[in-house]
Image (cartoon, coloured by chain):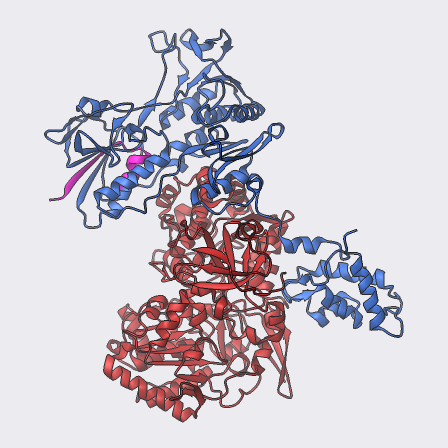
Chain colours: A red, B blue
Amino acid sequence: MSVETHCPYCALQCAMRLEVEDGAVTVAPRDFPTNRGGLCQKGWTSAAVLTAPDRITTPMVRGDDGELTPATWQDALGLVADRLTGIRDAHGADAVGVFGGGGLTNEKAYQLGKFARAVLGTRHIDYNGRFCMSSAAAAGNRAFGIDRGLPFPVEDIDRAGAVLLVGSNVADTMPPFVQHLAGAREHGGLIVVDPRVSATAALTTEGAGLHLQALPGTDLPLLLGILHLVVAEGWSDERYLARRTTGWEEVRRSVAAWWPARVAATTGVPESRLREAARLLADAAPHRGGAGAMVLTGRGAEQHADGTDTVTAAINLALALGLPGRPGSGYGCLTGQGNGQGGREHGQKADQLPGYRSIEDPADRAHVAGVWGVEPDSLPGKGVPAVELLGKLGTEVRALLVHGSNPVVSAPDATAVRRRLAALDLLVVCDLVPSETTELADVVLPVTQWAEEEGTMTSLEGRVLRRRTALAPPGEVRSELDVLADLAALLGSSVPMEREPAAVFDELARASAGGRADYSGLSHASLDEGTPMFWPAAPDSTPRLFAAAFAHPDGLARMVPVAAGGPDDDLRADAPVYLVTGRVLAQYQSGAQTRRVPALNRTAPDSFVELHPQLALRLGIEPGDGVRVTSSRGAASAPARITSTIRPDTVFMPFHWGGDALANAVTNDATDPVSGMPEFKVCAVSVTRAEEKLMEATG
Amino acid sequence: MREQVVVVGAGMVGHRFVEELVSRDREHRFDVHLVGAEEYEPYNRILLTEVLARRSDVAALTLPRPPERVSVQRGVSATSVDRDQRLVELDDGTALQYDHLVLATGASAFVPPIEGLGGEESPHHVHVLRTIDDCRDLVARTVNARHAVVLGGGVLGLEAACGLARRGLAVTVVHLDAHLMADQLDPAVAGTLARSLDDLGVRVHTSTSVAEVVGAYGELVAVRLTDGTVISTDLMLVSCGIRPETGLAAAAGLPTGRGVTVGADLASPADPAVRAIGDCAETPEGCSGLVAPGWEQAARLARLMTAAPAPLLEEPLPEGIRLKAAGVDLVARGVRGSGAGPDDRVVALSDPQARRHVEVVLRRGRLLGFTALGAPEVSASLSVAFERRTPLPVDPAALLVPQAGAPDARSTMEASPTLIPADATICRCNGVTKSDLMGAWDDGCHSVEEMASATRATTGCGGCTESVCGLVDWLTSSDGVDENSAQPVRNTTGHTVAGAKHQARSDEMLPS
């Protein structure tokens, strides 16, 4: 049997074909506009997770002995329903929390939001996409009135003469995407902002572009400085700004104090490179006769306590150059998780209902309540963002249901998160494989994965894709759609909960009709016909947004002046080095899936601390020595990887591992006031040689 | 009843102060009035030399509008202060009541007494550069002028000199001290600076000054220097520093020295209701004349007035100079070489021929100061190290050259296949090493396509295709594939021999 589907991992959603023979699945890439027949090692080896030796195949309930013990579905769900009822009766509906994930299908994300609001009646739902896309989403909504990661098909990037990548290491996080940078590299126009010579920054060498190796936490002043130069040189697209935007004058004034010499001293990026970056972008801008210019942000720019403002600065730069809405130009964010786009549109977010509707808007509430068959007044109000929700565990929130997430590894200040999870009266985790979070659960429910289920994913370009079943799930594994429907019934809810993915999707489409992310023209059947479908699809697909108007009522983009602050947890005498965290190519997110793939573990077996030879020499650290990285919140240890490609004032750790190497035990849980995004990407640490020798092959 | 705050002076510091105050005054305790003598909206004065150098549009100078709560009067000067009545009188005949008066009156350009200047016979085309109007006048004159004399080789004078040179004028800088920027630079560095200015068409005359300006028919034609030299010129710019504007304070009976005397709390010792910040103020540290300390004072005063918690006490970093001109990059902060103590380390790279000089001064592992001329990559990283006090390399010599290294991966990719170590990754997307590819070769894959299907190399982003081609070519030539059969020539023992061959290839990697 042969099944056409997409990769289980990142938002590029590379197309693949699964061949099933005697229950064994092999993966082959398919030609598709996003991946063009390419797959990275994670995609090639993704079938290995289907047969992970420690796959969870039965429900597990923690017994009196403190151990997780196999149980029947009936017993496990009955227990969950009883405990949830007890907690709701004692503490109210808001005492039950739901924590979702950006890897869930649209159907599951939708059903989870409906379950929380209509069945549980709790306002406390949020998801790990808060750690991923929230700053870009908030800034996009503020500027454009809509949040679709790339408001254009990914192939548009090929045409651009210059691409500014702020804090994105696509060569490691979505390798086949690198093909789309070939055009800019040929023009010498790839500009990468990163404190490390990442694999992506290395693509700028040999005349292919420019690497701006900025001090961590200074993306915002850097962007203000580039915009200052655009104004100073007279390169702004005044005609476009006058016709299509509001707020330009305030934004122009807001960069007057960010002259190049000041920006160079703040960011460590030499003035000549700032000027060159501004020139490359301006020369590629359409109003100056260029081939097109793109400004793209990633988590490096977004995961800050001023992440929304940093993205706003990137958008302001794009608008000043007249890019959004012009072919081959624009602003976009590079979504991270597989369904990071769809996951944020259909109701997992604390303040949102399906279709990107607002839970505070009476008309939006009435529409969705109508689809769900409940009274609008019965829907709860707005909840709180992920970090705040995790902060309430054990106090205001007594029970938590976790779906598609491993917050013990992926949340900031993770040691505190572990403590709070342990303080819950009830922790229920749906997952495929054991994780650091299932280890703490009272009940673990085994659920289907990628090749065992039907559904849809919305990729980084806002294209709705079909995920298809290649084989039956093992053991007693069930779909989350069944789990939620069963739980709803056990809780005595009269709200109908569909179980069939296609039927759930049809309901989602109705709920989204007229919303900002409108899927009403789509169905599994129409998607199976193979025509590309970008939302809004009401009923026709919209590959490119903003050609004529932005999504605000007046059709204009809003330019908002922003100010540079600096890291929340800044350097001081006892923490004189910055920690930045990120990803390696052969692991994904908290590693729960990829750490179970032997080939990936051969490539990336363990965590490491990357540091500059000068810093290593000062600290007496040699390659492979254990390095301890300590902040005011906690510490992590991993072997040293010494390389001159990182700034001497900065160390880097990947965050895919738990245990001693848990990078998020160190990171800061200060959040952005607008988006609720935590400041993963910069904090002050002390670095020392660990007592024990941790061996790692350097490379 | 809200407290009335009157800020006199809407320059960069007065402007920053009202922003800081309003953003902290969440209870709306204060009504804020900003009075500025210039007609223009507040602008970034620092960039006037950039406008002169044609490196910046005037539009880039306009600072953000003051917050809406602030009542702003532009083109109005304060004429006197009645401290008994707490009134500021304005030249439009009105007066403002205050509870708090903040003087941010700035400074004016200082013009020393020079023969022929200032009287009725004073010729046209002698300029100063302090305001946007000054800048416009100066730029207008450059259209017809061919030669410029700049009196005073400080930051403003040198930036302006470079800007005038970029506008095509022959420029001579006349400087009283024995060398340029004598307060900040040691003689050798100043000499290298003079040479880099000379490269840009700016001549420097030191140890002299302008004794007399010579006019004809009311137009400037020449200047005579104190050493007797006469230079023909049709434009002169006087940049001999600034003089704090203290008139208003002095007339109100407040103590003044070089500037308006204030304590660490920025209040006048004679009247706590009057504060002074920025260029007009003389704090216990003195008068700085730079914008960064002025901004710091603006923030400090706003915090004091709103009783906000003070930030952690850290000794303020010494200011320095940043010369911003196309073709000259100079940053000097903190202690310079000649100012180092006997136990301090001074490490320098002196390269006058390349117009480069980098110097760091360290005390017990801490960067006390640095000078970086003609080294823009280094000046940016040293500025960060100085301001953020990041750990320094064990050998400070490493600070003198750019620190970021070449990407490791890249150098591997570009090495000849022979030199690549066996465990080096060729295809990052799929984690394929050179030895994996050689293993595939041994298993009979002799084309890029066969290598790709066996190892998945090249199937991610495709960036390693060239390297894999190179490897296939190299293996083809070294393994002696029979082109016709496309089979490697092998001994019957197969892998053993192939292994030995690889051993031989690996040996080629050993350093000779």
Coordinates of residue A197 in the picture (x, y in percent): 57, 53
Coordinates of residue B302 in the picture (x, y in percent): 25, 42
Query: Which portion, as a residue range, is magenta?
Result: B1-18
Coordinates of residue A366 in the picture (x, y in percent): 28, 74
In the image shown, does A428 or B179 lie closer to the viewer? B179
Task: Give yes or no for residue B118 being in the magenta stretch.
Answer: no
Image side of residue A82 versus residue A105, left or right? left
Please tell me how many numbered marks the rendered image carries. Answer: 0
Q: Quadrant of the C terminus of chain A?
A: bottom right
In the image shown, does A631 or A37 lie closer to the viewer? A631
When the figure is inspected, residue A343 is found, relative to residue B73, above or below; the finding is below
Residue sitting at 77 percent across and 57 percent down?
B418
Coordinates of residue A552 in the picture (x, y in percent): 36, 58
Task: Give yes or no for residue B8 being in the magenta stretch.
Answer: yes
In the image shown, does B69 or B173 lie closer to the viewer? B173
In the image shown, does A179 or B30 lie closer to the viewer? B30
Q: In the figure, residue A504 lies in which quadrant? A: bottom left
Residue sitting at 15 percent across and 41 percent down?
B3
Q: Is residue B180 visible?
A: yes
Residue sitting at 47 percent across and 64 percent down?
A636
- Residue at the front extreme of this rendering: B343
